[in-house]
Image (cartoon, grey):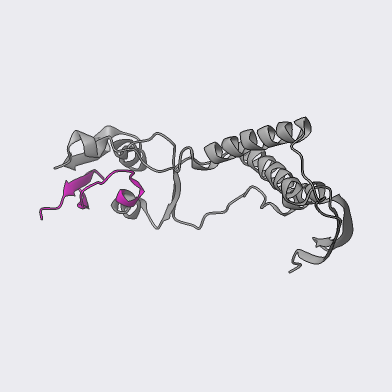
Amino acid sequence: MQKDTLDSVSINGGFSESFEMTSQIWIGFGFTTGLLLVFIWIVLGDPYKVLNEVQYNILRVLAALLGAFAAWFISGDSIIQISESLKGVDFVISGTLGFSILILIYLKFPKYPKNITLPDGYNFNIDPNWVFEDVVIAIAGGKSGNVEFEGFDTSHLKSKMKPAELSYPNELAAIIDLARFSISNIPPYKVTILNGGVYKLSVKNE
């Protein structure tokens, strides 16, 4: 398997003896700060948020821009030349450190995962904003009559779930393991299948 490698790096130049905050630098600093806040908001704003492909590509561009601005603030107008090998193709990046870091991060940033093939069995996606009760009913065939809850209170049934891709041997195994995808605590429970294929979830007595 061909691996991406960083063959060589050379840097020329550096800081001058005196440094003055010009209007251009202030504008760059403000722009960088704004990008950083947007980047943090996308990554940490909702820890259970699943980024779609467009949002992920925006994150990729923001990361490259932040790296470029950071390199510019640290190194000034230093010139860098990078010999790089990407997917078997050798090339050279030459320019200011900020520009080179921009290109390097953009090229090296992991691609958005596509065409994920789940193993055979029962595969199911938990959508954002779904609650525990919704997910159980959806797994049980989408009809509330296919599920019975015993010992759960409203807060348990309406507990928000983390978006996730489930892959289990069957529906029963998926329902049994659902509690670990809940944002709030759901009490331990057991699942039995009644006549007619009805799933009964019962809170375990401590």
Q: Position of residue 180 (x, y in %)?
A: 33, 52
Q: Position of residue 31 (x, y in %)?
A: 68, 33
Q: Position of residue 196 (x, y in %)?
A: 23, 43
Quarter of the image for residue 88 reads bottom right
Count all numbered tags in the image, as a single digit.
0
Residue 188 appears left or right of 81? left
Can you say whether 180 is above or below 66 in the image? Answer: below
Q: Looking at the image, can residue 154 be seen? A: yes
In the picture, the quarter occupied by the C terminus is bottom left
Q: Residue at x 31, y 33 (%)?
A: 143
Q: Residue at x 34, y 43 (%)?
A: 183
Q: Residue at x 49, y 57 (%)?
A: 120
Magenta region, residue range: 179-206
Quarter of the image for residue 145 reads top left
19 and 183: which is toward the camera: 19
Residue 117 appears left or right of 32? left
186 and 175: which is toward the camera: 186
139 and 8: which is toward the camera: 8
Q: Residue at x 71, y 33 (%)?
A: 26
92 and 152: which is toward the camera: 92
